[in-house]
Amino acid sequence: MNTEATQTDQTGVSPVTPLRDEGTGLLRANAFVEQLDARLQDCAEHDQTIALLKLSFGGLGVLNETLGDHVTEALIIQIAGILRPLESEGWLLGRMANDRFLIASFACSDKGDAMAAMGDLLQRFNAPIFVDGMELHLSSRAGAALFPLHGDNAQRLMLSARQALTRSLATEHNGVLLYTEELGLQAQRETRLTVDLRSAISRKQMYLTYEPQIDLRTGEVVAVDAVVVWNHPEYGVIDQTQIMTLADQTAQIIAIGEWIVSQAVSEIQKVQRLCAGTA
């Protein structure tokens, strides 16, 4: 085993090396994956359950905008300080970009034990953290995956934990969200839809439906709402809410909005010509 991952200096701060993040002293992502892979091979021989946690802290972007980089970086260093004692217990700790951390526990006997350990870990962040005299409260979200149940190597395990974290952030799930096969299929579906959305208009898979607005006093139709629908060749009808969510995430919302206006105008003009008998 590479002992560099668990050594600390006399101050209790992990040494800064090319393998470690300069600010926190935790392993960089690439080094974390390499060491995780090496340890998973050993764990497979002993039939151990390993828990991998991908941890994210919300609100750091707002803090960065309002209080500055120095505050958020000081906060991240304190987060690392809360995590760092786990290294002496054999845990593997890594920092990804911005507000995300990777944590692996090798002392789990089963799924229940793993989830309890991860839940206890999140409890460490319930107390406020003080930076420059300010009392800051953290909002944490976590996605977890278990070896070998959710992946037989570090990359697969990382993917499963990332998909669980993505779902946790999207649903504002409190605590640790454990990866499931259903969650993985849902992530694959969303990825496919994100890719296919870019060509949905050119492939003529989108169409408009119209919902009348009726004056309840007179019963007259006073307006019509155009609603976009996507007929996906594999997943069937995708409603407007899903379309707009995907469009917003992929910076296509303006293009789709322009298509809706253009298509609605074209169809209204066609109806007008039909009514006038000139179509």
Image (cartoon, rainbow, N blue to C red):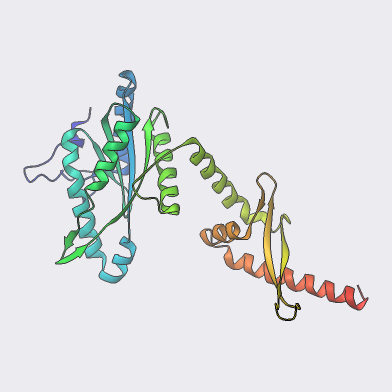
- Image x and y of residue 136, in percent: 22, 62
In front of the other: 40 or 163:
163
Residue 36 can be seen in this image: no
In front of the other: 257 or 19:
257
Q: Look at 58% across and 60% down and name the residue there.
A: 241
In front of the other: 52 or 218:
218
- Image x and y of residue 19, in percent: 25, 41
Residue 32 can be seen in this image: yes
Q: Look at 58% across and 46% down and name the residue there.
A: 192
- Image x and y of residue 8, in percent: 12, 40
Please determine whether, in this image, residue 82 is positioned above or below residue 113: below
Residue furthest toward the top? 45
185 left or right of 14? right
Quarter occupied by residue 31: top left
4 left or right of 172? left
Residue furthest toward the front? 217
Please determine whether, in this image, residue 248 is positioned above or below residue 167: below
Quarter occupied by residue 204: bottom right
Please determine whether, in this image, residue 210 is positioned above or below residue 12: below
